[in-house]
Amino acid sequence: MNSSSFPINDALDAALARWEQYGRPGTPDTGFVLSRLPGRRTRGIYVAGSEQPIFEPDAHILAMSPAPDGRRIALQLAERADEDGVLAVLDTTSGNLRHYNDIHCRYEPMQWTPDARSLAVVARSPQRLVQVDVVHDEVTVEPVAGDARCRLFSAGIHMLLAESRPASPTRLIRLDNSARLGSFPSITGVFGINDGDVLVYGGNALHVLDAHSGVERWRWMDPAVRLTAVTVTGDTVHASAVRAGASVLLRLAHGTVIDEWPVNSGGSVASITDLGADGGRTYVVIEAPAVPPHVVTVDERTRGGGAATVAGDFETVRHEFAADDGETLTVVVTSPKGFTGPAPTILTCYGGFGVPDLPVFEPTIPAWVESGGRYATAHIRGGGEHGEQWRRAGYGAGKRRGIDDLADAARGLAGADLTNPELLVLAGASHGGTVVASCALDHRGICTGFATTAAPLDLLSLEKHPLGRIWLDEFGDTSSPEGTQELRAISPLHRAKMIDPEHRLPRFLGIVLAEDSRVNPDDSYALASVLREAGAEALVWEAPHAGHGSNHLDSLHSMGSVLLSFAAHTTRRTRSSEGRHA
């Protein structure tokens, strides 16, 4: 089968389209929200609390930053799904949009001066500090460190530059006088707090510093959590975090946790996926596999209100299974309510870069489950679900540990009579795709098929990918013969080359993205070719107009429909309804 066509299961395709009608709201920022409204294919900017449109482009909005007075909004716009954004400034009154086509951005923080007359951003290609006087339409450029990744943050009246270098702490520097405020293992965000202090967060820690001297006023750290978002209102800090594989909401004051609330919605396992503050109120976006995302205030959440109803006849349950070394693995499973016995199951994971893989609303999940299947997500070592020790156990030379964890999760599902190998498809995107491919090829008979999306599959040639160099530490060391041998042993492409063709091979689908600026498609084609030579059925499908980051709804639909159709065919379900091609 060539890469331009794929047999689509019409029933699953229609179910997916129904579930995609739910929108994806954002949290308010200076009276505006960046959201995708129900039924729309693209994100737009709207007046908070209403659906009054301010800006609804066909382009991809990578980021927005409203000016303090709300008269203008700084945007990063990409015409394609390749995440190559350019700076633009929208006048919210006239609707006039000014593009700065020479200022390229990729999700970089954009900062306004308190008087709303100018904004600044660290632009890319080449990296430099750009300041735009929006009143006089004047642009000034200043150099920044060439050996570091630089990001700009604001904290009250202060502009701060974060400089990140490989294998070194990230330095935080005041822009006005070049004073170094401190160095930190990582910096995810910076806020103003306490009328003049600076809050820095990253990983599992919060630090509050004097903005002039850098003296630390307080610090909070918990190695058992992973912070996912932070916001500040006055001297109160709210943080969403992951503890023991579950989403929690924290409230802190002066370095002390005042409250910690588990996150659920209508009794269902749920997650916080966005957190923001506006007008003195703090907002969260809560969602679950069968609960579309919805925005509530923290006050509503902590009083037990704001819960959304499960949108279908489903149940989401956490299961615990033992890994081969005795560690406990969590697998979140969404099933038809009341269903017992084995069912066709899609098992996913991520397991890298310390990123937590939380149960969220993804339309493929209810579309698959309402047709009689199960959808499961495994928390494997290398991810961010269980703190720093968990993350380090599946990092670098420990990458095999996460791969084996996925196999143990699959065996646990079968042992619990939730599925069996003939009904199991492994699926993963990006780093998760690397893990599922290695698992399916290394643990023979664990599944009947596996699917990868935009995944690096040749771990000995990571540098050939556009962003491959920054992945080298995550997967292991190639500077020694031993390190190279360890990588070869888990590299999906090299595992496939060592397969005995006498054994039954799992079916493979490689989804590649036509506008991917992070992972090139060569590995997927190479793996498919090797597997076909060994007698396996292996397909590659290219998703048109799709990239590694934010995608429009029609692109997401195509990818989801292909994945579900592959899983249905591979688990021998409803073959008769497969009648057209994507």
Image (spheres, rainbow, N blue to C red):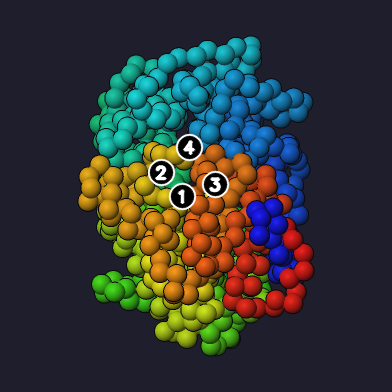
Question: Within 10 angstroms of label 1, few (less than 14), some, or many (20 or more) residues?
Answer: many
Mark drawn on residue 24: none
* CB under 8 Å between discs 4 and 1: no
**Residue 437 picture quarter:** bottom left
Identity of the residue drawn at 48% across and 71% down: 505
Q: Secondary structure at mark 2?
A: helix
For marks 4 and 1, the one nearer the N-term is 1
Amino acid at pointer 3: Pro
Q: Which mark is residue 456?
A: 1
Q: Which residue is mark 2?
A: 462
- Residue 387 x, y percent position in the rendering: 32, 57
| Residue wearing tag 3 | 521
Q: CA distance from mark 3 to mark 4?
A: 11 Å
First-in-chain label (3 vs 4): 4
- Dot 3 falls on a residue whose secondary structure is loop
Q: Nearer the viewer, mark 3 or mark 4?
A: 3
**What is the distance, in whole Å, between disc 3 and disc 1 at their CAs?**
8 Å
Compared to residue 148, the image places residue 184 above or below, namely below
Q: Amino acid at mark 2?
A: Leu
Q: Earlier in the sequence, mark 2 or mark 3?
A: 2
Q: Position of residue 407 (x, y in %)?
A: 39, 71
